[in-house]
Image (tube, rainbow, N blue to C red):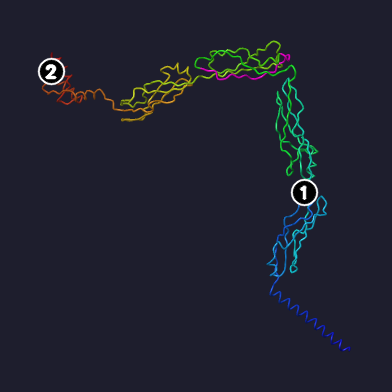
Amino acid sequence: MTNFFKTLGANFVSLLLSLILAIFIWGVAVRDSDPEDSIQLDVPVQVIGRPAEASVSGIPDTVGVGIRGPESVINQLSREDFVAELDLTDVAPGETTVPIDVRFDNQAIELVWQVPQDTTVLIERLITREVPVQVDVEGDVARGYVMGEAFVDPGTISVSGVASRVEALAEARVTVFLDNSQQDVVVTRRPIFYDHQGNITSISSLNVSTEQVVVTVPVDQLAGFAAKPIVVNWQGDPAQGYRLLDVSVEPDSVLVTGSPELLDRLARVQTEPIDISGLRESRTMQVALDLPPGIELDEVRPVFVEIEIEPILTSSVIRKTPEIRALPEGLTVTLDVDEVRVFLFGPLDKLDSLLEDDVRVTVDLFGLDIGEHSLEPDADVFVSEIEVRSIQPPQVTVILTHTLTETEELTTTAELGATFSPEEVTGSNGGALSFLLVFLGVPALGIPAGVLTWREKRRS
């Protein structure tokens, strides 16, 4: 019996070793036919238990995982086979580190690494507060006026966002500037937000109900004071050829005092009469005001009137004979026109008083040679404010020819005149006359008819 158990024990050990060896060999065979492989995936992070009416920051979009397993299984995996959960169900407001749990159902694979394994989240409450708007008024109203209490619309601004930033806001401010205002001031302004320490604070990423507010500053007139427009009392006409362009006054209104009844009946304040007769230029002058009885100035200030006078501009046409300049020596010039028309533009009075020598038209022949040339005449006006608009014709034809000398004229006359034989010019003066003709270049066979007449008169 003892030997039986010994034999059974020895066989059991052998059987167990054989089973282990068979499993090992099977594992090696399976591994060789389907080796291990690994893969990296980015798994989207899902948030569970996100708190309502709260802002959560610090949540990553994805988590990276490293997976290992048989190649046949790895090749079939995708990010949809995994779940990365961030559970905020029991997380209190504030800054907290929360683990990220990666889960999958396939038992043939294993998670080798995960990045990140946790994350630090900040949970803040979302609130809405009404922040009051304050108005700061700089400057003052005009004399005789009083400023009422400024008011703003809307009076508060609704601000929504994380509690820490919204609760830090103390107020919003707008500033209005008055410059001797005489009527209600209504402006639109963008408010600036301040914290409880009086520092300017940003409202970026916060939601506000309005970005602009309307501020109204009432301005009322004191009893016994009134602002009245100033009207210039002018008479006469400018000089002939000039016209009145504008009349202006500075300041254009004045603050006066008096009984309410007189002020109500007074529509405007006039200046003392201003005579503009014969004026030829603009003028600025200080004038006095013609105040009715019972009305006085609240403050004496100089009043200036500007009278703007301008000349009446018109056009005129004159005819001028062109003057020749730089005529080359030994040449004669001929123009195809006797005169040109010059179109002028300027003040009427100066055009009417224009003299003959005030306008000059010239044709410059500098550098030109014999022949026909087309040139532009040049016009000059020696009176200020008058300009030349055009010249007609815009170009003239110039013909330059050689100038004949006295000797050449005699030669030409001889060639064109009657001829006589040498016998007809013999005599006491014939030799001298023949010598003169030869000296002048006249052919020996002919002399001018005029010379013959002179000789015959000498004989008689």
**If you read the primary sequence from the N terminus, does the residue marked by circle 1 or circle 2 appear first?**
1
Look at mark 1 in the image and give the residue it sits on: 55
> What is the three-letter code of the residue carrying label 1?
Ser
350, 69: nearer the viewer: 69
Which mark is on residue 442?
none
Look at mark 2 in the image and give the residue it sits on: 428
230, 66: nearer the viewer: 230
Q: Distance between the residues labelled 1 and 2?
A: 145 Å
Q: In this view, does 230 lie above or below 73?
A: above
Seen from this angle, which residue lies furthest left? Answer: 423
- The secondary structure type at the circle numbered 1 is strand
Q: Locate residue 281: give its quadrant.
A: top right
Is 115 displayed left or right of 411 in the figure?
right
Q: Quadrant of the C terminus?
A: top left
Which residue is pictured at 76% across the width and 25% down the height? 148
Give residue 92's position: percent from left, percent from top.
Answer: 83, 51
Which residue is pictured at 68% across the width and 66% down the height? 76
Seen from this angle, which residue lies furthest top? Answer: 293
Give the magenta range: 242-261
Q: Locate residue 273: give its quadrant.
A: top right
Tag 1: Cα neighbours inside 10 Å, few (<14), some, or many (≥20)?
some
Give residue 302's position: percent from left, percent from top.
Answer: 66, 17
Q: Is residue 45 magenta?
A: no
Give residue 132's position: percent from left, percent from top.
Answer: 78, 36
